[in-house]
Amino acid sequence: MATKRGRMSEYDLQFIKDNAHHMDYVKIAKSINRTSKSVRKYMEQGLGLVISLEVDAAPVSLATVTYDIEDEDFWPVILQQFSETELIIFRYQWDAMYDQFGGDVLPTEKLQIIDIIKLEVLMNRNLIEQRSSSVGIQEHESEIIRMKADGVKDVMELGIVERQLAFLRTAQGSLGKDYREMQKNKDALNKSIKGTRDQRFDRIEKSGKTILKLIAEITTDSKLRKELGMRMEKMRLATIDEEIRLAAYHKYEDGNLDQPFLNCDTVKDDNGRINVWAETKKQLE
């Protein structure tokens, strides 16, 4: 049966008055075969009631790309591989790279990301060891100069210091070689998952779409211009409607109603109306 239109009858108005305090306006509308919009309007303007759009609404589940790597089965193994300071870097790098790909990460790509982060951590560790070697080399060189300036009293002791200096220099050279090798492997992994800046720009260029081409297409194609305009207007109205929905009174399981506080524009006035509602009601009707 089609929904009734036009002016409400005395029966409809009385039914709304009798059930306004214990029935949702949507259910009232169904009971008298009227639109929920007209019932809500009468309850607000005719009866001066505060209407909650959220009373019977199910909780909203918002999609997110956040992901906790510590929930993975292999995380306990990683805990044994790195220090607490390195684990902080590991978590940060994981979150950053996971967000970069928008959460669209396949199992094999996940392993590639983990390998890249491991190389990053090991490269940081390598640089720390290189710095420690550099400090040790400087100290041993200063010690040899001091011993020679004071006159060598113990040739064996001087020989020990010189051998330690040679060992540190060899270790520093080996660390530098290892660092360059890890950098090469890291670059190769980044290219394999197409995570470099050049590859991102290359994909954009190969797509054939540039901002100038898009502007020219919008200017010359009236159909596309109208379609994009409709999308923008729907998004604007949907944003307004969502702000009203989120700012409406929320009913808890114990039956209490409470007002969410989003910003200064959504604070209810003395009559229980939202400031933004008065400005946008005409656009939504």
Image: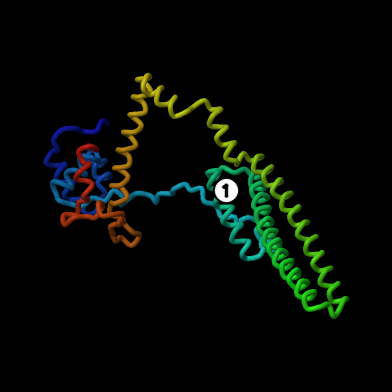
The one of 37 and 182 positioned closer to us in this rendering: 182
The one of 175 and 55 positioned closer to us in this rendering: 175
Disc 1 residue type (three-letter): Met
Q: Position of residue 62 (x, y in %)?
A: 44, 48
Q: Position of residue 281 (x, y in %)?
A: 21, 41
Q: Where is the N terminus found, in terms of image quarters?
A: top left
| Vertical comparison of 237 with 156: above or below | above
Residue at 23%, 50% (x, y): give it: 51
Q: Residue furthest bottom?
A: 153
Q: In this view, does 213 lie to the left or right of 25?
A: right
Residue at 56%, 42% (x, y): give it: 104
| Vertical comparison of 230 with 67: above or below | above
Q: Where is the C terminus found, in terms of image quarters?
A: top left
Q: Position of residue 20 (x, y in %)?
A: 20, 51
The one of 32 and 103 positioned closer to us in this rendering: 103
The residue singled out by tag 1 in the image is 97
The quarter of the displayed image where residue 226 is located: top left
Q: Position of residue 260 (x, y in %)?
A: 30, 56
Where disc 1 sits, the SS reads helix
How does the figure colour the protein chain or chains? Answer: rainbow
